[in-house]
């Protein structure tokens, strides 16, 4: 099997090829995998179900040990497909605080960062 990216891997039912597809995905296509649900109010307001998460969005954690916490997105990692959120932190042994990566599938946007006008097309 090739080591370069191929769109045909997406058609495969084998989990190893699905993982390889996601791992080798180019960055401009990986951004689509960063989509997360919108809250019910934002859904009706913008007419969309999901949108890629960006810095300065207010999000709520839906799953995991930090479930129920809300905070502003500090940064987004396209390589790990995860977001780092203010208030969702862990402490190291020496006492310093570190952000915990949260998968974007476990988040819900409750307030959008609308600085980018192209992000919301129907306004």
Image (tube, helix red, strand yellow):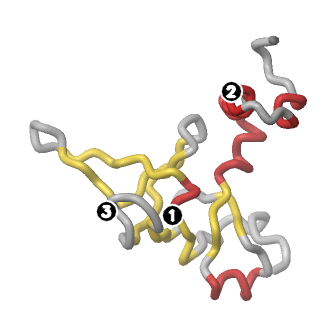
Residue picked out by circle 1: 56
Q: Upstream in the sequence, badge 2 or badge 3?
A: 2
Callout 3 crowding tier (Cα within 10 Å): few <14, some 14–19, many ≥20? some
Image quadrant containing the N terminus? top right
- How many residues crowd mark 2 within 10 Å: few (<14), some (14–19), many (20+)? few
Secondary structure of the residue carrying tag 1 is loop
Q: Quadrant of residue 120?
A: bottom right
Instruction: Tell which residue pokes out farthest to the left in this image.
Output: 94
On screen, 37 above or below 85? below
- Mark in the foreground, 2 or 1: 2
Q: Nearer the viewer, residue 64 or 89?
A: 64
* Residue 39 location (% of width, % of height): 60, 79
Residue that badge 3 annotates = 87
Gap between marks 2 and 3 measured at Cα? 35 Å
Residue at the location (61% across, 59% down)?
53
Image quadrant where one finds the C terminus: bottom right
Instruction: Measure the C-alpha gap from mark 3 to mark 1.
Output: 13 Å
User: Which of the two labelled residues, at mark 2 and mark 1, occupies the earlier sequence position?
Assistant: 2
SS category of the residue bearing label 2: helix
Residue 14 point in image, percent of width and height = 75, 31
Residue 107, how many percent across, how many down? 52, 63
| Badge number at residue 16 | 2
Q: Residues within 10 Å of mark 1 (few under 14, many from 20)?
A: some
């Amino acid at each position: 099997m090739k080591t370069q990216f191929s769109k045909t891997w997406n058609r495969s039912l084998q989990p190893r090829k699905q993982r390889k597809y996601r791992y080798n995905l180019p960055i401009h296509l990986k951004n689509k995998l960063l989509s997360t649900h919108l809250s019910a109010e934002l859904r009706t307001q913008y007419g969309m179900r999901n949108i890629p998460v960006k810095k300065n969005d207010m999000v709520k954690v839906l799953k995991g040990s930090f479930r129920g916490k809300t905070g502003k997105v500090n940064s987004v990692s396209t390589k790990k497909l995860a977001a780092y959120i203010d208030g969702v932190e862990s402490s190291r042994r020496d006492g310093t605080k570190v952000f915990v990566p949260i998968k974007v599938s476990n988040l819900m946007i409750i307030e959008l960062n609308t600085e980018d006008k192209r992000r919301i097309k129907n306004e």
